[in-house]
């Protein structure tokens, strides 16, 4: 009678292997430079980590962070939207115009403003998915259309005064920060759960990973991408309206430059430009890293023009790392 051989126990992973495993997580790869840069700026100027400065950083990142959640969904599905900044400005102008010129109740004006953002996203999805125009061209064109519409509606002027309730909400600082940051945290938690725990989240990854394979698996890839376009448009509208409430005026300049900041931060956070990978946590940490760099350079008295240069360098490095990671995965598979 043969004796059963005892099952072989797996060899414990070496310290180097565990370290490589931790560093391979995209969020960790961004979190480490974030911590190191924060400590560096603190060493140069201790005021950098003061409560007031931290609150200012979090407030600043909240607006683009709200948009980044939608942009992450869209980029995971394999597309991107360059019109989000102009969409934010258009929605803020529509909302403020309704409240000030047409006396529409603030709650209804906010709903309409966010709906305008969703409509912009719907138009983008139609042009990209049905007409076959590349997302870069379609959303770049929409960037100019939305920005022009903002100036037409406002005639180039600031819209004010906003209702008292909007001012109260916009200037409030719960927990010493702002409502926009708390909204960002709430949306981030929900979005993370959707991506990791729902069928819809899995269809987004499948669509961005390989659209043809996803289609053969029975996924309506066009519908999935369309929903992501609409979502990012609505969140852009919400971000623009949030800033409008914060500055207590409707300005057509709201959102200018946000599109590049959002995409840069999301890519830095490990969301692939080619679709199929990325997380909400990584995207938000990437945006926070950018804001820390900008705020840190100002705090230590560096020429502000270096801020723009640093964002470009960080983005190129992030995309390069993404390409290296993708090639390593292909070689390993």
Image (cartoon, rainbow, N blue to C red):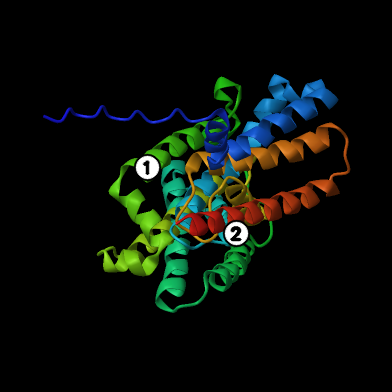
**Residue at 69%, 39% in the rendered image:** 291
Position of 304 with respect to 8 (left or right) is right
Mark 1, residue position? 196
Q: Nearer the viewer, residue 54 or 76?
A: 76
Report x, y in % for residue 202: 34, 51
Q: Is residue 194 left or right of residue 57?
A: left
Q: Earlier in the sequence, mark 2 or mark 1?
A: 2
Q: Quadrant of residue 276?
A: bottom left
| Label total for image | 2
Name the residue rendered at 54%, 56% in the picture.
326
- Identify the residue shown where x is 44% and y is 44%: 105
Does 20 sit above or below residue 77? above
Kindly report which numbered mark, 2 or 1, lies closer to the viewer in this rendering: 1
Residue 251 seen in this snapshot? no
Q: Is residue 274 visible?
A: yes
**Residue 2 locus on image (x, y percent):** 15, 31
Q: Mark 2 falls on what kind of element?
A: helix
**Image point (41%, 72%), residue name:** 129
Q: CA distance from mark 2 to mark 1?
A: 30 Å
Instruction: Classify the position of the N terminus by image quarter.
Output: top left
Question: For the residue labelled by badge 1, is the local secondary structure a helix, a strand or a loop?
Answer: helix
- Crowd rating for badge 2 (residues with CA inside 10 Å; few <14, some 14–19, many 20+): many
125 relative to 328 in the view: left or right: left
How far across and how far down the image is residue 325, in percent? 57, 52
- Place of residue 70 in the rendered image (x, y in percent of width and height, measured from the top left): 48, 50
In the orientation shown, which residue stands out farthest toward the front? 1
Residue under label 2, please give it: 86
Judging depth in this view, the residue of 258 and 238 nearest the camera is: 258
Residue placed furthest toward the left: 1
Question: Which quadrant holds residue 10?
Answer: top left
């Amino acid at each position: 009678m043969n004796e059963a051989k005892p099952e072989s126990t797996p060899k414990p992973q070496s310290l180097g292997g565990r370290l490589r495993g931790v560093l391979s997580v995209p969020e960790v790869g961004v979190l480490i430079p974030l911590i190191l840069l924060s400590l560096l700026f603190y060493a140069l100027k201790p005021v950098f980590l003061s409560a007031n400065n931290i609150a200012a950083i979090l407030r600043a990142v909240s607006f683009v962070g709200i948009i980044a959640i939608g942009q992450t969904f869209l980029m995971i599905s394999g597309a991107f939207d360059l019109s989000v900044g102009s969409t934010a400005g258009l929605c803020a102008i529509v909302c403020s115009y309704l409240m000030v010129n047409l006396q529409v109740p603030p709650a209804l004006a906010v709903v309409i403003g966010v709906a305008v953002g969703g409509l912009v996203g719907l138009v983008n999805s139609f042009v990209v998915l049905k007409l076959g125009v590349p997302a870069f061209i379609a959303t770049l064109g929409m960037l100019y259309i939305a920005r022009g519409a903002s100036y037409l509606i406002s005639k180039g002027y600031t819209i004010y005064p906003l209702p008292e309730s909007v001012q109260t909400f916009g200037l409030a600082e719960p927990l010493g920060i702002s409502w926009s940051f708390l909204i960002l945290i709430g949306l981030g938690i929900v979005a993370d759960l959707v991506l990791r725990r729902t069928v819809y989240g899995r269809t987004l990854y499948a669509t961005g990973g390989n659209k043809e394979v996803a289609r053969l698996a029975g996924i309506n890839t066009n519908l999935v991408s369309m929903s992501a376009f609409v979502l990012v448009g609505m969140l852009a509208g919400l971000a623009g309206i949030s800033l409008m409430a914060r500055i207590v005026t409707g300005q057509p300049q709201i959102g200018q430059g946000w599109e590049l900041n959002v995409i840069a931060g999301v890519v830095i956070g490990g969301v692939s430009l080619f679709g199929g990978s990325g997380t909400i946590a990584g995207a938000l940490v990437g945006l926070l890293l950018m804001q820390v760099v900008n705020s840190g350079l100002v705090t230590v008295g560096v020429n502000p023009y270096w801020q723009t240069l640093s964002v470009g360098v960080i983005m190129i490095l992030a995309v390069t790392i993404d390409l290296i990671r993708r090639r390593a995965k292909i070689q390993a598979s």
